[in-house]
Image (tube, helix red, strand yellow):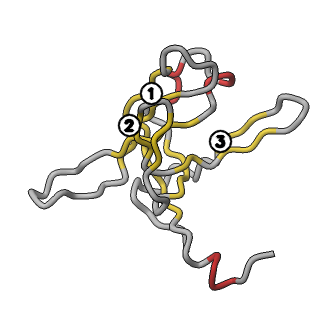
Amino acid sequence: MILYDDFKKIEIRAGKILSAEKIPETDKLIKLSVDFTEKSIEGISTPRQIVSGISMYFPDPAVLVGKTCMFVTNLEPRMIKGFESNGMLFAISDDKGNFSLLEPNSSIEPGTQAA
């Protein structure tokens, strides 16, 4: 169990996947470029790179492009197989091989933060 105050520290946002590609020489990893509508100092939207271990469910990672999914966006960056990951994709799987991404309904815009 965690305290509610600890849970409130987690930032959950909708992000639109702009690109997805398998990381060579790995079985599980896909490198995602995700738009959270974050603006740089110059006012330009800067996508984040997120590495996710979901390749076994997406033999063709291109099917992920255009999907809006939910992500944890305030994790410390982490190097995974030489690639910096700046967040975590919300997904679920079970021991029967069932898998699902957490996808909001189509009215939710990228960058929307969970309440």
Give the Cα separation between the discs numbered 1 and 3: 14 Å
26, 58: nearer the viewer: 26
> Closer to the observer: label 3 or label 2?
2
The first of marks 2 and 1 along the sequence is 1
Residue ID at (44%, 63%):
112
Residue 33's disc is 2
Q: Mark 1: which secondary structure?
A: strand
The reply to whether callout 1 and callout 3 are in contact (CB within 8 Å) is no
> Closer to the observer: label 1 or label 3?
1
Give the Cα separation between the discs numbered 2 and 1: 7 Å
Residue 106 coordinates in the image, percent (x, y): 51, 49
Residue ID at (55%, 76%):
9
68, 54: nearer the viewer: 54
Q: Is residue 3 left or right of residue 18?
A: right
Residue 20's disc is 1
Residue 1's disc is none
Mark 2 residue type: Ser
Mark 3 residue type: Leu
Q: Residues within 10 Å of mark 2 (few under 14, many from 20)?
A: many
Q: Mark 2: which secondary structure?
A: strand
Residue ID at (48%, 55%):
14
Residue 1 coordinates in the image, percent (x, y): 81, 75
Q: Residues within 10 Å of mark 1 (few under 14, many from 20)?
A: many
Image quadrant holding the C terminus, namely bottom right
Residue 85 coordinates in the image, percent (x, y): 44, 43
Look at mark 3 in the image and give the residue it sits on. Answer: 101
The first of marks 1 and 3 along the sequence is 1
Residue ID at (13%, 61%):
41
- 40 relative to 46, above or below: below
Give the Cα separation between the discs numbered 3 and 2: 16 Å
